[in-house]
Image (cartoon, grey):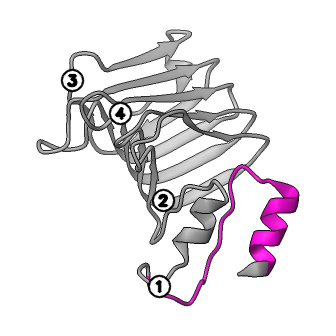
């Protein structure tokens, strides 16, 4: 653990992924990583804005590939922004943007080589018990959004914008 934290302090990556940690979710040392300023997701889940703090942001860029996230939430109990650009790809089983009341989640996928693929995309909530936020998704510059299952809007303040408005945006719902 000290080697990883020392490396992270010296290099300050935006995202630090550890695999095969050989411990249960409960055993994972979340405290030291949070103290270092990182959100912590275990068992393939990523909750941004989980602690009620706002201003969380994640940019996946420059050919980066983020795969196999179970549930990806941008704006759970605090506002958050996710940007996918510069030929980056993100793959998630389910994604929620702007989940709870008073929370804003923003998702932007931009440029023709960038893509977000998910089985379900929920804007302004996640289910009937967790809803009331504002989820905004913008797909631009011929980026790709593929939703193989449900696309759901849980609040009237949520929106999905696709520009330029043509089938080349790659949205499959």
Residue 31, image quadrant: bottom right
The reply to whether callout 3 and callout 4 are in contact (CB within 8 Å) is yes
Instruction: Please report whichever mark, 1 or 4, sits nearer to the chain's N-terminal start.
Output: 1
* Residue ID for mark 4: 98
**C-alpha gap between disc 1 and disc 3:** 37 Å
**Residue 144 shown in magenta:** no
The reply to whether callout 2 and callout 3 are in contact (CB within 8 Å) is no
Q: Position of residue 7 (x, y in %)?
A: 84, 68
> Which element is circle 4 on?
loop
* Residue ID for mark 1: 27
**C-alpha gap between disc 3 and disc 4:** 10 Å
In front: label 2 or label 1: 1
Compared to residue 141, the image places residue 47 above or below, namely below
* Residue ID for mark 3: 155
Residue 77, image quadrant: top left
**C-alpha gap between disc 1 and disc 4:** 29 Å
């Amino acid at each position: 653990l000290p080697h990883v934290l020392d490396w992270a302090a010296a290099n300050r990556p935006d995202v630090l992924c550890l695999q095969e940690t050989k411990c249960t979710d409960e055993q994972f040392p979340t405290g030291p990583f949070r103290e270092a300023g990182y959100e912590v997701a275990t068992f393939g889940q990523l909750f941004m804005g989980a602690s009620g703090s706002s201003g969380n942001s994640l940019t996946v860029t420059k050919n980066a590939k983020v795969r196999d996230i179970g549930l990806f939430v941008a704006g759970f109990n605090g506002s958050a922004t996710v940007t996918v650009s510069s030929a980056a790809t993100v793959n998630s089983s389910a994604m929620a943007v702007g989940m709870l009341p008073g929370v804003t989640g923003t998702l932007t996928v931009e440029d023709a080589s960038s893509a977000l693929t998910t089985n379900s995309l929920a804007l302004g909530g996640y289910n009937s018990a967790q809803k009331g936020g504002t989820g905004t998704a913008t797909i631009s510059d011929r980026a790709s959004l593929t939703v193989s299952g449900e696309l759901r809007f849980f609040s009237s303040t949520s929106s999905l914008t696709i520009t330029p408005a043509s089938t080349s945006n790659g949205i499959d719902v």
